[in-house]
Image: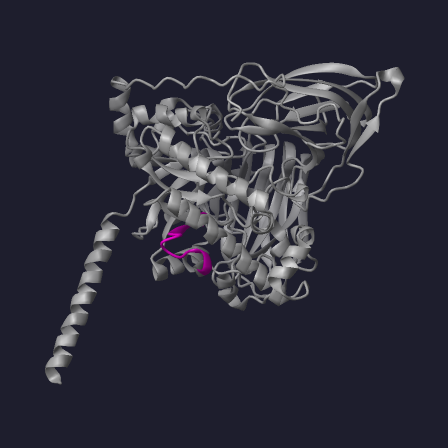
Amino acid sequence: MGWKRWFGGMVVCAIIAGVAMLSTAARAKTPHLGAGAYGPCDAASVAANARWDWLLIPFGNVADTPQGMQQFNRFLTLNPHQKYLVRLWPIDNVGLPVYGGQATFLDYLFNPAARQYIRATIRRQIKMVQDQLAKPQNVVGYTFLEETPAHWGLGGELRAGHFTKLPAAVVHYRQAIAKAYGHPLKCDERFWLWLGKEYVSSLRSIYRLIHKEAPGKLILYWQHTNYLTLDDASFDGFPGTQPMLYPYRWTAIIKKPLCDGLMAYAGIPWKTWQHRYMAPVRKHDWFFFSQLSHPGSMRLASWATALKEAKDPLPQNLGYFFYCGDDLTDASPWADPEMAKLAVGSAGRFVNWTADPRYGKVVRISQPSDKVVSDVFQGDVPVKGGQTYHYSFLARTQHVNGLQGACLVTVWDGAKGNVLGWDPAVYVTGNTPWKRYQGKAVAPALATGARFYLQLRYASGTVWFADAALCDSAGKNLLTNGAFTQGRETPLQITGWYVEDDSAIARQWRAFCNQEHIGDAVVKRAAAHPAPVAALSPQAKPHSDAANLAANGTFKNGIDGWKFLETAGGAQTQHPKLLSRVEVPATDGGGWALQVSVEHMKWKQVLSHGTGALCLFKGAAAPNATLVVSFEARTLSGSPYLLLTRPSGGASVDHVVTMGKTWKKYTATVTTGPYVTTALFFTLVKNAANAVPIQPVVAGQFLLRNVRIVPAQPYDHS
């Protein structure tokens, strides 16, 4: 028996060694993406876009047409090594109105027509990449949508604690869902978990399709960082009512060979990064890529921490993409004039440590733009859950003007770095003398730490901060150097505080990119000897219906083709009076008109918010196209300024017209921006200026009729 055990042991050792060799060989073939960007930047040059190691091909924003793919072929002429991750987006205008027309997993499972459309669109988009991209072998992998389950997963309706009534899609498909479920439909844990299984089932079905259509490519799951899975329930013993908890596990979705990994969001506390993302990555050998966000408002950690996370040395790290927003719109730092403007100044900073005759050393934040956030903050402040803490600070402001202002924000963290909530305390604008602002806040039950931010948030002007405190019940200030007496000016370092401003981040990023980008040398060589760019395929002629993109522009078919849109957070509740069809008296020409009621909606930390009318197109308008919009309008109440704009995604030129009390015909020219456009948004704004791309929406009512939208030049409607 001894030789058998010896032989068996040798066989086991040989198998282990073979598996190790295979694993090493597979790891040697791990695709390396490097530093990338969230799709092509329309404002940047071809060379600036080609400079990235990789780009996202974001269908839904980029047209899934030969013309849409042509821009990537231009980049490949300069950088033939540039790689791509493709975001498939087949869900627009096929779902229920309450979800803005976007399909959900319940549409896919219980509406055969929607399922057929989604699968056909996925096939078309994959084939478009395979047939039209000059180097399809440079595509590393695919994601189905992004920021799920906000998309596809019913948004907030399945969050634990919010699952108190049946979601709208469940009500719509109630009969079919009840048959599949086999039990009465109730908002209980059993049905909640069942819906989670169906969500996973829909994704697995789609992954099988992608795997079949694009063999050999990675498939990655892209989850919105604000949504937690059942795996996260172990964080600090979260109860089942944790508001952001969703009814599925990572391991139910990410199973090779159908799904190879996930998107990890850099810029969160280091402990959260390790526990939430890196622990399962190590355990299951999943690939991951990450988003590196430039705006401080999109991060819950310092730039240094975000960079450390994005460059995590784990072998499963594919790379990261740089995201720039807040109206520095996805811009490459080599070609973005706005970032160049923000980087100038005496010290090139918005944040300074300066002297005040009354309070000694103070923090001064001064920024020229209302599109950015600058702050000083202190992390890892020890707190105890359930206890009350008193905050206090001194501030004065000068010409602070914007959508928010000077403020204090306290963020509460759990034991493993997970965010449990935050409390904005004060927003100050205008010109104010030195004043003490104070109050109290209760730490969530599971909180072990806090972060204390003093910010100039989405506002221009100058604020001075002094004498900051976060005190416990005994009156002890838990902040280090709350009086700002310790630090140094060159380079700026305020003891105990992190300094964050967008100008400093822009400089850091440029310096970093000059060292990191492997594409630079390739681009320089190719620029000296550029390869010929393939000619654009012939453009299709407009549809024979006179190319009017507006669906039901005369309102003969009721309000079909028109939807209510809310431009900020919260449920998109269809109010019966927001959109309605009214008959026009014969004295005014007769026919029908659309009455639009715009409501102002309050929602913190949002740049613009309100309601309006969304005009759906019969076919998609190409990127960077010029649309001629004609319509008749008249104001009923509120602001006379009517804004026409794209509802979301990418830069575009908005147009404002001034309505009168009587009917008048208007003609406006609107550009579609860098992405495909499928709808146009009509709403009221406060003035006629176009300094802010999307202006604050105001309340009021207006009428529309005879809406006609045509391209200035022919383009492909496919």
Q: Please state which of residues 55 and 109 is positioned toward the viewer in this rendering.
A: 109
Q: Please state which of residues 524 and 529 is positioned toward the viewer in this rendering.
A: 529
Q: Please state which of residues 21 and 1 is positioned toward the viewer in this rendering.
A: 1
Q: Please state which of residues 478 and 516 is positioned toward the viewer in this rendering.
A: 516
Q: Is residue 486 left or right of residue 412?
A: left
At horizontal 75% and vertical 26% (from top left) the residue drawn is 555
Residue 399 in which image quadrant: top right
Q: Is residue 300 left or right of residue 141?
A: right
At horizontal 60% and vertical 39% (from top left) the residue drawn is 94
Residue 211: where, in percent of width, then height?
38, 47
Q: Is residue 125 left or right of residue 283?
A: right
**Which residue ends up furthest to the bottom in the rendered image?**
1
Q: Magenta segment: does it hold 264?
A: yes
Q: Is the N terminus in the top left, top right, bottom left or bottom right quadrant?
A: bottom left
Q: Is residue 174 left or right of residue 373?
A: right
> Does 193 sit above or below residue 127?
below
At horizontal 48% and vertical 58% (from top left) the residue drawn is 417
Query: Is the image coloured rainbow, by chain, by secondary structure, or in one colour?
Result: one colour
Residue 405 in which image quadrant: top right
**Which residue ends up furthest to the left in the rendered image?**
3
Residue 387: where, in percent of width, then height?
63, 65
Question: What residue span does the magenta drawing correspond to?
Answer: 252-268
Residue 292 in view in this figure: yes
Residue 522: where, in percent of width, then height?
26, 28
Q: Magenta segment: does it hold 299?
A: no
At horizontal 68% and vertical 65% (from top left) the residue drawn is 184
> Does 587 sit above or below residue 369?
above
> Does 474 sit above or below residue 260?
below
Residue 542: where, in percent of width, then height?
56, 18
Residue 297 in view in this figure: no
Residue 17 in which image quadrant: bottom left
> Does 360 sit above or below residue 20?
above
